[in-house]
Image (spheres, rainbow, N blue to C red):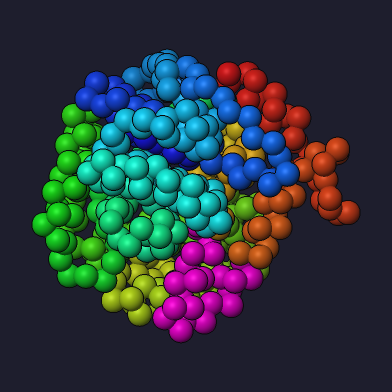
Amino acid sequence: ILSIGSHPNIAFYNWRLNASKAVKLATVASTAILDSSTPASIQNAKPTTYSWSSNQFGNERYTLNSVYNSVDDYISLNGASPENLDFIFLSATSLQELSTVCSTLSSVLKVQLANHNVPTIIVESTNFVNLEPFVKMSLQLDDQIPVISIMSDFDIREVGNDNFLVFKSKKESELIYVGKSGRESSYTSEEIGLINKIADLFESSNIDVYKLNTPLEFLSYQWKFALPKITVEPLSIIFEKPFPSDLQNQILAKPLISGLIFEIITVIKTMGCKLFNSYDNEVSLLERLSQLYPQVDLSLDASEAPKLYYDFFNQNQLYLDLLLLQPILIADDYQVKTPYLEFLYAVMSQYNSNNFSTLETSTSIFWLRKNTENIRQLRLQQD
């Protein structure tokens, strides 16, 4: 297995797959795109130690020996005689980065195909919708490589450098979902076989896997995951109201919530997806979110808040391109207008840009994160 990207869920999958003792795992820690003027420096794979805390799986520090700085490093060091890859877990921070990584991977995949080995790409799709067609288009390999999606119910928090926490959730169950999103009413026999293989890997490490019956049903679940992340959680950052019940009392937020939910539900219905009872209208959605994230006093690192707020507060990656831009592009394909969502994407992109500013790097004439040094100190304490 080759695992690419720094998404916390990818780190979680790595941890559990490594614990299963059933796989040989190589990881690429970053998918950062280098400027074309930056000289490439090939780095050998190095051991990296990860720390995990979890009520369900216990606390563990473990080391992966084959960790590469970039996809280019992996290819440069393994391209001449690559090992056969069965699965490639893939994440990226943006659509541009996803396209670049896929394009770079093409050379590896062509060698695999020449050796009569067809690996499966598994795209991290938690809170993201219908990324498989984009990945296939970026690979430019004429559908020779199967592309599957994976989603996770687990609330994974990055609390330091290579230091992670499985946050205790109020959900009724915590599962991994494996499948393919689409409008088809059935899977092919090949896709069913691949889904079962991936499920077996995770079930061998004591994780329950939910296998949905059709691509359309899987797509419906993707929208279920994404809906609150798109419509409510970004507004909690803009209005500095971490909890849904707080946000509902902010009079300026109410029309924005209504407009965003209406736009996304319109896209969902246009695609022929089924809406879930707790997510099919504004009132029930906000009631459900208030149950999952009841209002409490925040600790120093805001760990009690929903994940997007937590990640913004702690200056972690937000994946806004995949979260907000991808639904805009999908809506455009179905001729659904999304002015609320387009404006939200623009505002959140600017917020996120300012979020990483320091006195030395800020380009804004108005805003500066006041607690940058506090967050750095928190991370050092966690590490």
State whether residue 363 is above or below residue 300: below
Q: Residue at x 65, y 25 (%)?
A: 378
Between 85 and 215, the one lying in front of the other is: 85
Q: Position of residue 250 (x, y in %)?
A: 62, 62
Relative to 49, is 194 above or below?
Answer: below
Q: Magenta stretch containing residue 347, yes or no?
A: no
Q: Nearer the viewer, residue 59 or 94?
A: 94
Q: Which residue is outermost to the left? A: 189
Q: Is residue 327 magenta?
A: yes
Residue at 40 percent across and 60 percent down: it is 140
Q: Which residues are magenta?
A: 322-344
Q: Do we see residue 106 in this rendering? A: yes
Determine which quarter of the picture holds residue 182: bottom left
Is 100 placed above or below 335 here? above
Between 279 and 73, the one nearer to me in the picture: 73
In the rendered image, which quarter contains the N terminus? top left
Q: How many marks?
A: 0
Toward which corner of the image does residue 69 lie, by quadrant? top right
Residue sitting at x 63%, y 25%: 379
Determine the residue located farthest toward the right in the rendered image: 365
Q: Measuring from the top left, give residue 333's x and y in whole percent.
A: 44, 78
